[in-house]
Each structure stands twice: as C-alpha cells, then as structure tokens.
C-alpha cells in the first residue's frame, strides 16, 4: 500500500511542478487556461485537486513538444506526466 501512496504523491508533485512550468510562459499559460476553462483563482483554490492534475497532464499530452520540454525542465521522464489510461477513468 505504501508504494501506491508514494506513486500517487509523485504523480501529484510532478503535476504541480508541470503546472508551474506551464504558467511560467504567458502564451502557454493563456492556452492552458483557454483549453481548460480554468482561471487563476481556480488554480489557487484547486492546487491539490486530482482533477486539476489530470487537466495538466491532458494538456501536456496534447502537445508533445511541451510534454518533452516540461519533463526535461522539471526533471522527470515524459511518461510521468501522461494521464492514466482512459479505461481507468470514471
């Protein structure tokens, strides 16, 4: 059980780091906000929300150059930033 919790924490940490990377560049941040329908106050209020983390991963999945650049910038493998397989989603 400990391993699953650690993996979940690692995924959350990577997603939060990726969100910081996304928001560090104005055009990319604007694209993220437009595509997700979120606004800055949503981000602050939902920073620990797994749904926000999924939105970050889906955003990166949709543009491979961003996925690779983000993974490199935050020091993780690109696969760590990909969402779970869709068949596991509710």
Image (cartoon, rainbow, N blue to C red):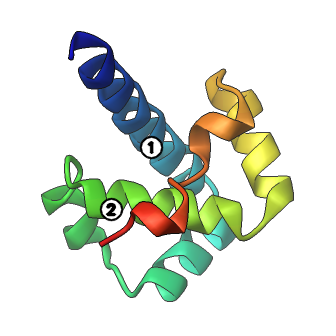
Quarter of the image holding residue 63? Answer: bottom right
Question: At x 60% / y 35%, what residue is drawn?
Answer: 80
Image side of residue 40 versus residue 22, left or right: left
Image side of residue 2 versus residue 59, left or right: left
Q: Could you tell me how many numbered marks the image carries? A: 2
Q: Where is residue 18 shown, x and y percent of the image?
A: 53, 44
Q: CA distance from mark 1 to mark 2?
A: 8 Å
Q: Residues within 10 Å of mark 2 (few under 14, many from 20)?
A: many
Q: Where is residue 89 shown, x and y percent of the image?
A: 37, 67
Residue at the spot of label 2: 52
Quarter containing the N terminus = top left
In the orientation shown, which residue stands out farthest toward the left?
A: 45
Against 21, is 4 above or below?
Answer: above
Q: Where is residue 81 shown, x and y percent of the image?
A: 59, 43
Question: At x 66% / y 21%, what residue is drawn?
Answer: 75
Given residues 90 and 32, the one toward you in this image is 90
- Indicate which disc residue 42 carries: none
Against 12, is 85 above or below?
Answer: below
Disc 2 element = helix
Q: Where is residue 29 shown, x and y percent of the image?
A: 55, 67
Sequence-earlier tag: 1 or 2: 1
Question: At x 29% / y 63%, what residue is drawn?
Answer: 51
Quarter of the image holding residue 54? Answer: bottom left
Pointers 1 and 2 in contact (CB under 8 A)?
yes
Given residues 46 and 81, the one toward you in this image is 81
- Indicate which disc residue 15 carries: 1
Disc 1 element = helix
Question: At x 48% / y 45%, what residue is drawn?
Answer: 20
């Amino acid at each position: 059980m400990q391993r699953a919790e650690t993996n979940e924490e690692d995924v959350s940490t990577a997603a939060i780091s990726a969100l910081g990377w996304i928001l560090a560049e104005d055009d990319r941040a604007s694209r993220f906000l437009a595509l997700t329908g979120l606004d800055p106050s949503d981000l602050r209020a939902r920073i620990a929300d797994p749904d926000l983390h999924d939105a970050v991963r889906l955003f990166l999945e949709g543009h491979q150059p961003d996925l690779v650049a983000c993974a490199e910038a935050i020091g993780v493998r690109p696969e760590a930033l990909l969402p779970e397989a869709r068949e596991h989603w509710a």
